């Protein structure tokens, strides 16, 4: 009994030492890596799918064709421009002389009727009317002659010019009224020349394209 107890105690001691050493050895080992332990059992990742094929971008469609219209464009008349042409002074002067002669003849007839009526009122009305008719004939003749030669002057400009000439001839008459030898020729000459020169000058100053 004593020897058996000693053997059992010795075996128990050896077993206890072996168990203690095994526990210490396990405690000193590094902990297992969960990833490495599970790696053999985990399935391999599936390969990435190939990229889809690149589709070629079609070129843009061509612009729609617009047929060229064959219809003629609307005609726009050119604006009248001043091309520098002027009426002929000779034609204007000739027309003024002819018109003045006709107007003066009509004016003389009006004065004759006014004097024959033996009325002061008729004479006072007849003199301005005769002067107006003579001036209208002169301005009309200048305008017709100027327009016929390519001019584009104004009738009323010619009428105003001959009126200024008539006033100048009246001033000549008043200045030479005391001298019988020079009064008559100077007055008649100024009454013929000054209105014609004035009418031609007025027409020439207004000779440019007219507004239409």
Image: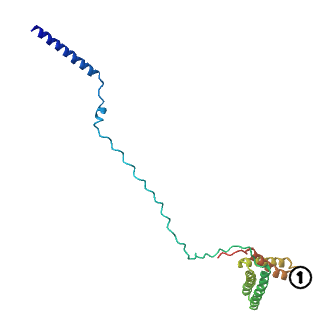
Q: Secondary structure at mark 1?
A: helix
Q: What kind of colouring is applied to the model shown?
A: rainbow
Q: Position of residue 165 (x, y in %)?
A: 79, 77
Seen in the image, is 120 located left or right of residue 79?
right
- Which residue is identified by label 1? 180
Q: Position of residue 149 (x, y in %)?
A: 75, 81
Q: Nearer the viewer, residue 134 or 200?
A: 200
Looking at the image, how many numbered discs can be counted on the residues? 1
Residue at the extreme top of the image, as rendered: 2
Seen in the image, is 86 located left or right of residue 70?
right
Residue at 87% from the left image edge and 82% from the top image edge: 185
Give the image quarter of residue 96.
bottom right
Quarter holding the C terminus is bottom right
Q: Nearer the viewer, residue 113 or 136?
A: 136
Give the image quarter of residue 89.
bottom right
Residue at 14% from the left image edge and 9% from the top image edge: 6
Residue at the extreme bottom of the image, as rendered: 116
Quarter holding the N terminus is top left
Q: Position of residue 186 (x, y in %)?
A: 86, 80
């Amino acid at each position: 009994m004593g020897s058996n107890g000693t053997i059992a105690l010795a075996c128990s001691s050896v077993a206890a030492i072996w168990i203690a050493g095994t526990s210490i050895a396990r405690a000193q080992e590094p902990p297992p890596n969960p990833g490495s332990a599970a790696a053999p059992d985990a399935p391999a990742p599936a390969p990435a799918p190939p990229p889809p094929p690149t589709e070629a971008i079609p070129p843009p469609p061509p612009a729609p064709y617009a047929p060229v219209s064959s219809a003629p464009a609307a005609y726009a008349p050119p604006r009248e421009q001043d091309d520098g042409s002027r009426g002929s002074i000779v034609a204007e002067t000739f027309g003024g002389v002819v018109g003045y002669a006709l107007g003066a003849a009509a004016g003389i007839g009006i004065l004759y009727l006014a004097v024959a009526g033996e009325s002061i009122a008729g004479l006072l009305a007849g003199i301005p009317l005769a002067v107006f008719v003579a001036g209208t004939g002169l301005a009309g003749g200048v305008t017709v002659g100027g327009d016929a030669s390519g001019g584009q002057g104004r009738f009323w400009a010619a009428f105003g010019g001959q009126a200024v000439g008539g006033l100048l001839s009246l001033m000549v008459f008043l200045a030479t009224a005391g001298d019988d030898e020079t009064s008559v020729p100077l007055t008649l000459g100024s009454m013929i020349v000054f209105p014609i020169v004035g009418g031609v000058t007025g027409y020439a100053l207004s000779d440019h394209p007219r507004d239409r």
